[in-house]
Image: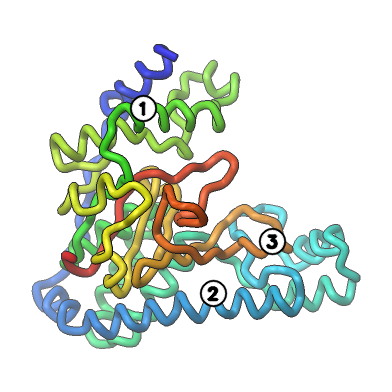
Amino acid sequence: MLKFAAVIIGFAAIITPPAHALIQFSAAEKAEHQQKLPVILQTAAKCLDDTYADHVKFHDRYRASKYYGNRRKDYRTLEQRATALRGAGFSEVQAYEIARQQVGTACITMAMQCLEQGFQKAGGLSLTSWNKINAHMRSVDYLGTDLQIALQDLGWKIYYWNPSNSVEQMKQWDLDDRRIAPLKPSEVAAGRRHNAVWGNHAAHYSNVTRGGKYYRTTVDNATALVGFGDQPPAAFARVPFFLGTAHVGYHVFPGRFGDVIEAHSMRNLASRDNMEFSKFNPLGSGGGPKWTATEKYRSGLVAVPYDF
């Protein structure tokens, strides 16, 4: 127990964040972004709704997911997906019919696709801005926190979210993370000290409250989404589109009006929960971002278009 606690407390000192290279948006780009923000937000939110509705409709028809995890190496080709579907009980004809319609996705993929639709709908300098964001995201291997920082550079605000304000509770969460997703003996032997699925909640809370930084992200608001338990603030439900991340961007969850619509990158082809819909309520029953057996999302960042 004490050994784990020492790792938790020392996390901030273990990792030295690299410098963040800001995307160079012009003053004209920033001004036009604010002017066209309503179009971007409305279009991005509609994209989330349409994508989720498409997922549900397809699964209701075929009992398989149209959107499959693009991190699954065994799903990368049509033949691989058809083989997996046959293994799930589909006939050869059904397997190929479904596989030909399937589309790869991931948490960051859906978020970027919906934002891209918004920027494209806005047109003008928004297209220039999006091309810069897209190029930057490719250069950092699509890290969710970098997408949030890019939006922040355009005038969005980044809020720290954590349903607790008890450091002792956060330390227990940290111990829980290490218990349900321990490092492998080979990783420990190699000197690894961190698992990407861990939240390191206590250390991040300390860094945010004392220095206004979450890893390498500057936090604009460290109080409005903190300590709400299982009752998120009502004002958050009025935000027309948001981009959330958990555990230093390990998971990305876009949403609108207090609802989370998230995609996943490693689940089975027949799974209905390759995409999930929920209320933003990490500790509430049925709330999101959704947990798994080894991933309990209990703190992180959310980018919002303006203060609420």
What residue is drawn where x is 32% and y is 59%? 147
What residue is drawn where x is 56% and y is 79%? 53
Q: Which residue is mark 3?
A: 271
The answer to which of marks 2 and 3 sits earlier in the sequence is 2
What residue is drawn where x is 62% and y is 61%? 273
Q: Which residue is mark 1?
A: 171
The answer to which of marks 3 and 1 sits earlier in the sequence is 1
Q: Which residue is mark 2?
A: 52
Local crowd at mark 2 within 10 Å, few (<14), some, or many (≥20)?
some
From the viewer's perspective, is 248 left or right of 60?
left
The answer to which of marks 2 and 1 sits earlier in the sequence is 2
- Horizontal and vertical percent position of residue 305: 22, 69
Q: What numbered label is drawn on residue 148?
A: none
Q: Residue furthest left?
A: 27
Question: In the rendered structure, which amino acid carries the disc numbered 2?
Answer: Tyr
Quarter of the picture holding the C terminus: bottom left
